[in-house]
Image (tube, helix red, strand yellow):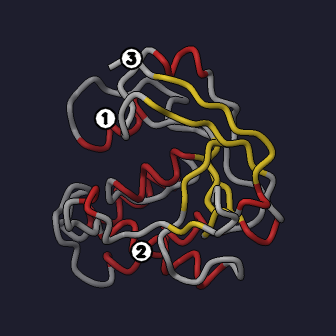
């Protein structure tokens, strides 16, 4: 970017240790299908909330001590946004429900088929229905509100309840490439190791 070039995510970069989590390939393919600004490459993840750099100075961040915060201005056709809890739900392989009733209905249907929400490999048509729920993340209309903690969440350590307790309602943004012309401000800072 300092040379005026665009920068894309390299999924084969050594920092990923040769691993390509299915979730990121799934997300990249979905973005390509639903947004003209994406061509199937891995996206950059962006904060939609200005970060508290004082807080970030006191934590260990990927990449070491020297860090940078870059404020961007992107054309609407070049980014997508959604609440982070929606991605966290997909990333952990759970059904993306927009209400507690929707989730209860899904669990009831699974139970009637002799399956549970933590069944490792769902057979069809259940796998298809699960993946169809994930497609909701690409809807361009208003996103559903964060409802996971509308009622008390059990303290058990099931994957679903852990997700519901720890999920974030913060919005995130994605873009296919970063361009020097996108940059409004750059702030260099040093994190504590």
Residue 26's disc number: 2
Q: Is residue 59 above or below residue 178?
A: above
Q: Residues within 10 Å of mark 3 (few under 14, many from 20)?
A: few
Residue positioned 50% across, 34% down in the render: 67
For marks 3 and 2, the one nearer the N-term is 2
> What residue is pinned by disc 1?
162
- x then y, percent, for residue 36: 71, 82
Write down the quadrant of residue 90 in the picture: bottom left
Picture quarter with the N terminus: bottom right
- Give the side of residue 156 with respect to residue 89, left or right: left
Picture quarter with the C terminus: top left
For marks 2 and 1, the one nearer the N-term is 2
Instruction: Give the Cα separation between the discs numbered 3 and 1.
Output: 29 Å
Q: Residues within 10 Å of mark 1 (few under 14, many from 20)?
A: some
Q: Is residue 58 above or below residue 189?
A: above
Residue positioned 57% across, 36% down in the render: 68
Which one is in front, 186 or 83?
186
Q: Of helix, strand and loop, which one carries label 2?
A: helix
Instruction: Give the Cα separation between the discs numbered 3 and 2.
Output: 35 Å
- Give the side of residue 19 with respect to residue 148, left or right: left
> What residue is pinned by disc 3?
192
Q: Of helix, strand and loop, which one carries label 3?
A: loop
Q: Is residue 41 above or below residue 182?
A: below
For marks 3 and 1, the one nearer the N-term is 1
State which mark lies toward you, 2 or 1. 2
């Amino acid at each position: 970017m300092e040379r005026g070039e665009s920068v894309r995510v390299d999924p084969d970069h050594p920092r990923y240790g040769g691993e390509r989590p299915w979730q990121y390939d799934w997300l990249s393919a979905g973005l390509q299908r639903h947004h003209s600004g994406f061509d199937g490459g891995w996206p950059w993840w962006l904060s939609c909330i200005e970060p508290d750099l004082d807080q970030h100075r006191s934590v260990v961040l990927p990449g070491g001590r020297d860090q940078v915060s870059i404020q961007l201005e992107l054309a609407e056709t070049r980014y997508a946004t959604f609440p982070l809890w929606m991605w966290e739900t997909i990333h952990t392989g759970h059904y993306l429900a927009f209400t507690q009733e929707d989730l209860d209905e899904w669990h009831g249907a699974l139970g009637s088929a002799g399956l549970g929400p933590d069944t490792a490999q769902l057979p069809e048509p259940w796998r298809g229905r699960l993946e169809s729920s994930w497609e909701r993340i690409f809807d361009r209309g208003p996103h559903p509100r964060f409802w996971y903690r509308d009622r008390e969440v059990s303290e058990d350590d099931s994957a679903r309840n852990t997700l519901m307790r720890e999920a974030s309602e913060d919005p995130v943004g994605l873009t296919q490439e970063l361009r020097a012309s996108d940059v409004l401000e750059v702030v260099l800072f040093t994190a504590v190791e």
